[in-house]
Amino acid sequence: MIGRAMERRGLPRIGVVGTGVAAMLIHIPAILDSDYFLLEAVCDTDPSRLASTPGTRLRRYASVTDMAQDPDIDAVVVCTPPDTHFDIAARLIAAGKHVLMEKPLTRTAEEAAELARRAGAAGVELRVAHERRFQPSCERIRELLGERVIGTPFYCGVHWGTTVKLDPDRFVPEDAGGAFRAGYRWRWSSPYSGGGVLQDHIPHYVDLIRDWTGQEPIAVMADTKNVARDLKGWSSDDSRWEDMGVALIRFSAGLTLRLECSVVGRVLSPLWGAPTGIGEWSEWGYIMGSEGQLVFDFLSLHASEQGKIAVWRSSTAGPGGTGWTMIEQPEPDRIRGSAPSGAAKDMFVGQVREFARAIRGERSRSADAYDGGICVAVTEAAYEAAETDRTVEIEFTTRGEDR
């Protein structure tokens, strides 16, 4: 469905709801640094934050209802807390707007399925910000697995860790506006965030495994800890959610994902040999296949550098053979624009590009409502598994119903 703004100007006009960290550091810079949308308006219920959003030409709305009624806006990016996602998306969909929703799509799988149904009935695109699909190193891993460089993958282990919650005053990285510190504190304490580190990271890697292998998650086991509350003396209000979590997720063709995530500890990365303990995070993992193994090691989400990838192949290993080999990747473009540079810019602008393709009715690799919904279903099941100490099967069946 193409609105009159697209017909008149050739490019869709886009608005952004929520002007917090995700909008200001990721979505708005990526839109401005691309040629796929015209940024038309912003919306926030906080008057001071709304007024401080840069851009003299932007229309500013204090309510989603008002923005939804703007006939010159074709699409909207939603960057608000998870508990608001369903209501905001429902209003925008009812008004005929295409929606790109920050993850998680919704609080529950039931809400995700309902939004998918409404978007399908309204003829609009409902997409989810699973931007890791477009990180160049993640796309290279997808290619390597597709080429069967390590045969059939059967196991993936991932470590995502940071020390920031052990001593926030020392370990949260400094930034000009204090956005990192405020963002962490909000995630740890707000009842509106909806969950802790499992909610933050299960969607990323469930989506990546599905994108890399085409396999679907079918069952999950999980365990969680609240280290700051139980071992460091934090109050329940300050440490509301788990700060350490492990999930074991089984996929449809036999692959098992072990995802370990923490804001109370990190492990030295294997390829970058980082970090010192001050700064953002460690994120690395490995994939075992029937014919070899692959190791990946990423820097922070906003890093300009590519991640590092190494492979070991049984066919070329052994005495006199070839052991672990680093995978060559293109040099990133480190010229800074409005958005982050290099690999991060490629990732965030790539997400904008694929959202625009979806709106035009072209083949798109952006995550759709089903992709976002299955990640919500796995996250829900993981919390149930941790609470009940049992394996929980994954159920989410809107595929086909949202088409």
Image (cartoon, grey):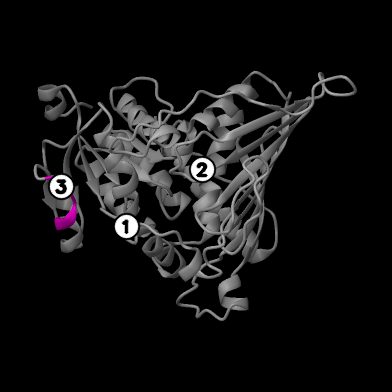
Alpha carbon distance from label 1 to label 2: 36 Å
In the rendered image, residue 350, in percent from the top left (x then y), is placed at 38, 30
Check disc 1 and report the residue beneath it: 176
Residue type at tag 1: Ala
Compared across the picture, whether 4 is left or right of 327 comes to: left
Residue plotted at (61% across, 77% down): 230
One can see residue 267 in this view: yes
The residue carrying pointer 3 sits among few (fewer than 14), some (14 to 19) or many (20 or more) residues within 10 Å by Cα, namely many
Where residue 44 sits, quadrant-wise, is bottom left
- Disc 2 marks which residue? 374
Q: Judge whether residue 325 is colored magenta.
A: no
Q: Is mark 2 on a helix, strand or loop?
A: helix
Choose the circle earlier in sequence order: 3 or 2. Answer: 3
Q: Quick one: label 2, few (<14), some, or many (20+) residues within 10 Å? A: many
- Magenta segment, prevailing SS (helix, strand or loop): loop
In the image, what residue type sits under mark 2? Ile
Instruction: Inspect this view and state whether residue 62 appears.
Output: no
Q: Which amino acid does label 3 sit on?
A: Met
Q: What element carries label 3?
A: helix
Q: Find residue 61 and report its horizontal and vertical position in percent.
A: 13, 52
Residue span colored magenta: 51-55
Mark 1 or mark 2: which comes first in sequence? Answer: 1
Q: Left or right? Give the position of 58 relative to 83.
A: left
> How far separated are the C-alphas under marks 1 and 3?
30 Å
Circle 3 sits on which residue?
67
Residue that appears at 56% across and 64% down: 243
Q: Is the Cβ of the residue at disc 1 closer than 8 Å to that at disc 2?
A: no
- The answer to which quarter of the image holds residue 309 is top right
Which mark is in front, 1 or 2? 1
In this view of the protein, which residue sits in the foreground, 186 or 170?
170
* Quarter of the rendering occupied by the C terminus: top left
Residue 368: x and y in percent read 41, 35
